[in-house]
Amino acid sequence: MVLSGGTFTMPRLIRTAPNGDLFLSDSGAGTLFVLRGVAPKGKAAQVEKFATGLDHPFGIAFYPAENPKYVYVGNATTIQRFPYHSGDLHAAGPAETIVHDIPGYAQLTGGGH
């Protein structure tokens, strides 16, 4: 599957949801995308914005692993979760911030991970 083509700014991580959808965190765009299916030329058949306005997202986790109720997103300075039902293309509700004030922005402070 081809992921490029102008859709993404700074793609960081891809995780497969239990139903087979691909979730992609785009740190540069502050967006969590859902990619579904494969088009004839190998690109994603459908690309949707699951959540926007995120702070440099990179980590993605589904919880619980089977029949998840949440998608967790690791941002630069927070961890948030969104309500999720298998097959959702958009967040089923608003973000809930689980962890605040993680020391982030290593590129600005000289740190790293």
Image: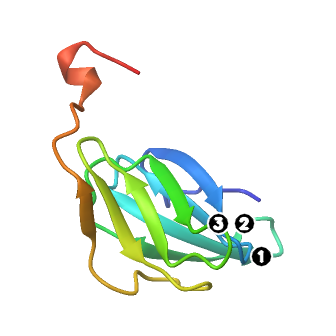
Which one is earlier in the sequence, the residue at label 1 or at label 3?
Answer: 1
Image quadrant for the N terminus? bottom right
Whether residues under marks 3 and 2 lie with C-beta atoms below 8 angstroms apart, the answer is no
Q: Is residue 72 above or below residue 58?
A: below
The residue sitting at 50% across, 55% down in the picture is 60
Q: Secondary structure at mark 2?
A: loop
Q: Secondary structure at mark 3?
A: loop
Q: Measuring from the top left, give residue 106's x and y in whole percent.
A: 27, 23
Q: Which mark is residue 104?
A: none
Coordinates of residue 104 in the picture (x, y in percent): 24, 32
The part of the image, by quadrant, that contains residue 5 is: bottom right
Q: Residues within 10 Å of mark 3 (few under 14, many from 20)?
A: few
Which residue in the protein does label 3 denote? 65
Measure how far apart labels 1 and 3 are at the Cα level: 28 Å
Kindly state the secondary structure of the residue where label 1 is placed. Answer: loop
How packed mark 1 is, by other alpha carbons closer than 10 Å (few <14, some 14-19, many 20 or more), is few
Please state which amino acid type lies under the numbered disc 1.
Answer: Ala
The image position of residue 11, as x and y in percent, is 50, 47
Residue identifier under label 1: 39
Give the Cα distance between marks 1 and 2.
5 Å
Foreground residue, 81 or 57?
A: 81
Dot 3 amino acid type: Ala
